[in-house]
Image (cartoon, rainbow, N blue to C red):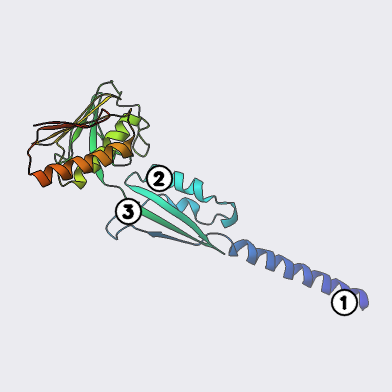
Amino acid sequence: MRSKKYYFLFFFSCFVWIGLLHYIDKLYQVKKIEVIGVSETETFIGISQFENKYIWVLEEERISQILDTINPSYKVAEVRKQYPNSLVIIVHRRYPSAYIEVGNGYLLLSKEGAILQKHREIEQESVPVIHYYQNIPYATFQAGTNIDKKDIRDALYFLEVIKGAKEKVVRIDIAGYHMLGLYTDTHEYFFSSEKNREVQLYQFEQVLTQLQIQGSKFKRIDFRFDKPVVIF
Protein backbone atom coordinates (compact mmCIF):
# COMPACT_ATOMS: atom_id res chain seq x y z
CA MET A 1 0.00 0.00 0.00
CA ARG A 2 2.76 2.38 0.94
CA SER A 3 4.58 1.86 -2.37
CA LYS A 4 1.36 2.54 -4.30
CA LYS A 5 0.92 5.72 -2.33
CA TYR A 6 4.47 6.82 -3.17
CA TYR A 7 3.91 6.04 -6.87
CA PHE A 8 0.70 8.05 -6.82
CA LEU A 9 2.40 11.01 -5.16
CA PHE A 10 5.31 10.78 -7.58
CA PHE A 11 3.11 10.78 -10.70
CA PHE A 12 0.84 13.42 -9.24
CA SER A 13 3.87 15.65 -8.55
CA CYS A 14 5.16 15.10 -12.09
CA PHE A 15 1.75 15.98 -13.48
CA VAL A 16 1.63 19.16 -11.39
CA TRP A 17 5.15 20.20 -12.43
CA ILE A 18 4.45 19.53 -16.11
CA GLY A 19 1.26 21.54 -15.88
CA LEU A 20 3.06 24.36 -14.07
CA LEU A 21 5.90 24.43 -16.61
CA HIS A 22 3.41 24.43 -19.48
CA TYR A 23 1.55 27.33 -17.87
CA ILE A 24 4.77 29.31 -17.39
CA ASP A 25 5.85 28.49 -20.93
CA LYS A 26 2.61 29.92 -22.33
CA LEU A 27 2.48 32.80 -19.86
CA TYR A 28 5.70 34.43 -21.14
CA GLN A 29 4.97 34.10 -24.85
CA VAL A 30 4.01 37.42 -26.45
CA LYS A 31 0.24 37.52 -26.90
CA LYS A 32 -0.47 41.23 -27.20
CA ILE A 33 1.32 43.89 -29.26
CA GLU A 34 0.10 47.48 -29.11
CA VAL A 35 1.34 50.02 -31.66
CA ILE A 36 0.84 53.64 -30.60
CA GLY A 37 1.07 56.40 -33.21
CA VAL A 38 -0.57 54.76 -36.23
CA SER A 39 -4.03 55.91 -37.31
CA GLU A 40 -6.79 53.41 -38.00
CA THR A 41 -6.55 54.09 -41.75
CA GLU A 42 -2.82 53.28 -41.95
CA THR A 43 -0.95 50.00 -41.81
CA PHE A 44 2.09 49.13 -39.71
CA ILE A 45 3.55 45.81 -40.80
CA GLY A 46 5.88 43.23 -39.31
CA ILE A 47 4.64 42.91 -35.73
CA SER A 48 3.23 39.41 -36.22
CA GLN A 49 6.76 37.97 -36.34
CA PHE A 50 7.13 38.70 -32.62
CA GLU A 51 3.92 36.99 -31.56
CA ASN A 52 4.34 33.80 -29.49
CA LYS A 53 8.04 34.56 -28.99
CA TYR A 54 9.38 34.37 -25.45
CA ILE A 55 9.37 37.93 -24.17
CA TRP A 56 12.68 37.61 -22.34
CA VAL A 57 14.63 36.75 -25.50
CA LEU A 58 13.36 39.75 -27.48
CA GLU A 59 15.68 42.77 -27.66
CA GLU A 60 14.04 46.18 -27.87
CA GLU A 61 16.78 47.68 -30.06
CA ARG A 62 16.62 44.79 -32.52
CA ILE A 63 12.82 45.08 -32.77
CA SER A 64 13.21 48.81 -33.52
CA GLN A 65 15.74 48.14 -36.28
CA ILE A 66 13.57 45.51 -37.96
CA LEU A 67 10.38 47.57 -37.85
CA ASP A 68 12.15 50.76 -38.96
CA THR A 69 13.45 49.01 -42.06
CA ILE A 70 10.15 47.52 -43.20
CA ASN A 71 8.07 50.58 -42.24
CA PRO A 72 10.06 53.47 -43.76
CA SER A 73 7.20 55.94 -43.22
CA TYR A 74 7.53 55.54 -39.44
CA LYS A 75 10.24 56.02 -36.85
CA VAL A 76 10.10 53.58 -33.94
CA ALA A 77 10.62 55.84 -30.95
CA GLU A 78 10.37 53.21 -28.22
CA VAL A 79 9.79 49.49 -27.71
CA ARG A 80 8.63 48.58 -24.22
CA LYS A 81 8.19 45.12 -22.72
CA GLN A 82 5.26 44.66 -20.37
CA TYR A 83 5.59 41.39 -18.53
CA PRO A 84 4.41 38.76 -18.72
CA ASN A 85 3.36 38.78 -22.39
CA SER A 86 2.87 42.22 -23.95
CA LEU A 87 4.83 44.63 -26.16
CA VAL A 88 4.14 48.33 -26.56
CA ILE A 89 5.63 49.97 -29.67
CA ILE A 90 5.56 53.77 -29.92
CA VAL A 91 6.07 55.22 -33.41
CA HIS A 92 6.20 58.66 -35.04
CA ARG A 93 5.14 59.40 -38.60
CA ARG A 94 7.86 60.47 -40.99
CA TYR A 95 6.86 63.03 -43.60
CA PRO A 96 8.41 63.74 -47.02
CA SER A 97 10.96 66.54 -46.93
CA ALA A 98 12.79 66.41 -50.27
CA TYR A 99 13.57 64.28 -53.28
CA ILE A 100 17.15 63.61 -54.26
CA GLU A 101 17.86 63.01 -57.92
CA VAL A 102 19.77 59.77 -58.53
CA GLY A 103 20.54 57.71 -61.60
CA ASN A 104 17.28 56.98 -63.45
CA GLY A 105 15.06 58.07 -60.60
CA TYR A 106 14.48 59.80 -57.29
CA LEU A 107 14.66 58.96 -53.59
CA LEU A 108 12.02 60.53 -51.35
CA LEU A 109 13.64 61.56 -48.06
CA SER A 110 12.34 62.49 -44.63
CA LYS A 111 13.91 65.40 -42.76
CA GLU A 112 16.06 62.89 -40.84
CA GLY A 113 17.49 61.44 -44.06
CA ALA A 114 15.41 58.26 -44.07
CA ILE A 115 14.46 56.96 -47.52
CA LEU A 116 10.66 56.76 -47.57
CA GLN A 117 10.16 55.70 -51.18
CA LYS A 118 11.92 55.22 -54.50
CA HIS A 119 10.36 56.55 -57.71
CA ARG A 120 11.29 56.68 -61.36
CA GLU A 121 9.35 59.93 -61.69
CA ILE A 122 8.51 62.73 -59.27
CA GLU A 123 5.09 62.05 -57.75
CA GLN A 124 4.82 64.92 -55.24
CA GLU A 125 5.33 68.21 -57.03
CA SER A 126 5.26 70.22 -53.80
CA VAL A 127 8.44 68.54 -52.53
CA PRO A 128 11.76 70.22 -53.54
CA VAL A 129 14.41 68.28 -55.44
CA ILE A 130 18.04 68.00 -54.36
CA HIS A 131 20.51 68.06 -57.26
CA TYR A 132 23.69 66.35 -56.09
CA TYR A 133 27.14 66.86 -57.54
CA GLN A 134 27.99 63.15 -57.54
CA ASN A 135 26.20 60.39 -59.40
CA ILE A 136 24.28 58.09 -57.06
CA PRO A 137 23.10 54.84 -58.69
CA TYR A 138 19.39 54.16 -58.21
CA ALA A 139 20.05 50.72 -56.70
CA THR A 140 22.54 51.95 -54.08
CA PHE A 141 19.89 52.71 -51.46
CA GLN A 142 16.63 51.00 -50.55
CA ALA A 143 13.47 52.29 -48.87
CA GLY A 144 13.81 51.92 -45.11
CA THR A 145 17.52 52.74 -45.05
CA ASN A 146 19.16 56.09 -44.30
CA ILE A 147 21.25 58.46 -46.36
CA ASP A 148 24.67 58.51 -44.71
CA LYS A 149 26.12 61.50 -46.57
CA LYS A 150 26.67 64.45 -44.25
CA ASP A 151 26.18 67.17 -46.87
CA ILE A 152 22.77 65.75 -47.84
CA ARG A 153 21.69 65.46 -44.22
CA ASP A 154 22.87 69.03 -43.58
CA ALA A 155 20.87 70.27 -46.57
CA LEU A 156 17.76 68.58 -45.12
CA TYR A 157 18.48 70.24 -41.77
CA PHE A 158 18.72 73.72 -43.32
CA LEU A 159 15.61 73.00 -45.37
CA GLU A 160 13.71 72.65 -42.08
CA VAL A 161 15.37 75.85 -40.80
CA ILE A 162 14.07 77.81 -43.79
CA LYS A 163 10.63 76.20 -43.45
CA GLY A 164 10.63 77.46 -39.87
CA ALA A 165 11.02 80.99 -41.26
CA LYS A 166 7.81 80.48 -43.27
CA GLU A 167 9.57 80.21 -46.62
CA LYS A 168 9.16 77.46 -49.18
CA VAL A 169 12.30 75.98 -50.71
CA VAL A 170 11.75 75.03 -54.35
CA ARG A 171 15.22 73.69 -55.22
CA ILE A 172 18.40 72.52 -53.52
CA ASP A 173 21.82 72.32 -55.19
CA ILE A 174 24.70 70.55 -53.47
CA ALA A 175 28.03 71.28 -55.18
CA GLY A 176 30.11 69.74 -52.38
CA TYR A 177 30.62 70.12 -48.63
CA HIS A 178 31.43 73.78 -49.13
CA MET A 179 28.29 74.65 -51.08
CA LEU A 180 24.71 73.87 -50.10
CA GLY A 181 22.38 76.13 -52.05
CA LEU A 182 18.74 76.35 -51.02
CA TYR A 183 16.45 78.45 -53.22
CA THR A 184 13.00 79.90 -52.67
CA ASP A 185 11.06 81.89 -55.27
CA THR A 186 12.54 85.13 -53.93
CA HIS A 187 15.66 84.27 -51.92
CA GLU A 188 18.88 82.26 -52.13
CA TYR A 189 20.56 80.78 -49.06
CA PHE A 190 24.05 79.29 -49.09
CA PHE A 191 25.30 77.03 -46.29
CA SER A 192 28.33 74.78 -45.74
CA SER A 193 28.85 71.30 -44.29
CA GLU A 194 32.32 72.42 -43.30
CA LYS A 195 30.89 74.90 -40.80
CA ASN A 196 29.06 74.12 -37.57
CA ARG A 197 25.29 73.72 -38.05
CA GLU A 198 24.34 75.54 -34.86
CA VAL A 199 26.54 78.51 -35.71
CA GLN A 200 24.85 78.85 -39.10
CA LEU A 201 21.41 78.46 -37.51
CA TYR A 202 22.19 81.23 -35.02
CA GLN A 203 23.47 83.52 -37.79
CA PHE A 204 20.41 82.75 -39.92
CA GLU A 205 18.04 83.74 -37.13
CA GLN A 206 20.01 86.87 -36.23
CA VAL A 207 20.39 88.14 -39.80
CA LEU A 208 16.76 87.51 -40.73
CA THR A 209 15.53 89.24 -37.58
CA GLN A 210 17.71 92.27 -38.31
CA LEU A 211 16.58 92.48 -41.95
CA GLN A 212 12.95 92.24 -40.91
CA ILE A 213 13.38 95.02 -38.35
CA GLN A 214 15.02 97.21 -40.99
CA GLY A 215 12.42 96.26 -43.59
CA SER A 216 15.24 95.46 -46.03
CA LYS A 217 14.66 93.27 -49.06
CA PHE A 218 17.49 90.96 -50.01
CA LYS A 219 18.36 88.51 -52.75
CA ARG A 220 20.94 86.24 -51.15
CA ILE A 221 22.49 85.41 -47.78
CA ASP A 222 25.71 83.39 -47.68
CA PHE A 223 26.54 81.71 -44.34
CA ARG A 224 29.66 79.85 -45.47
CA PHE A 225 32.10 82.41 -44.11
CA ASP A 226 32.90 83.70 -40.63
CA LYS A 227 30.34 86.45 -41.05
CA PRO A 228 27.21 86.17 -43.21
CA VAL A 229 27.30 87.99 -46.55
CA VAL A 230 24.04 89.64 -47.62
CA ILE A 231 23.40 90.52 -51.26
CA PHE A 232 20.60 93.02 -51.89
Front position in the image: 217 or 48: 217
- The answer for how far apart the CA atoms under marks 2 and 1 are is 59 Å
The residue type indicated by label 2 comes to Asp
| Disc 3 versus disc 1: nearer the observer | 3
Residue 217: image x %, image y %? Answer: 7, 38
SS of the residue under disc 2: helix
Disc 1 crowd rating (10 Å Cα; few below 14, some 14-19, many 20+) is few
Q: Is residue 24 above or below residue 137?
A: below
Residue identified by numbered label 3: 43
In screen coordinates, is 232 left or right of 23?
left
Residue identified by numbered label 1: 5
Residue 157: image x %, image y %? Answer: 28, 39
The label on residue 68 is 2
SS of the residue under disc 1: helix
The residue type indicated by label 1 comes to Lys
Q: In which quadrant of the rendered view does residue 100 lie?
A: top left
Instruction: Kindly tell me whether residue 153 is visible in this rendering.
Output: yes
SS of the residue under disc 3: loop
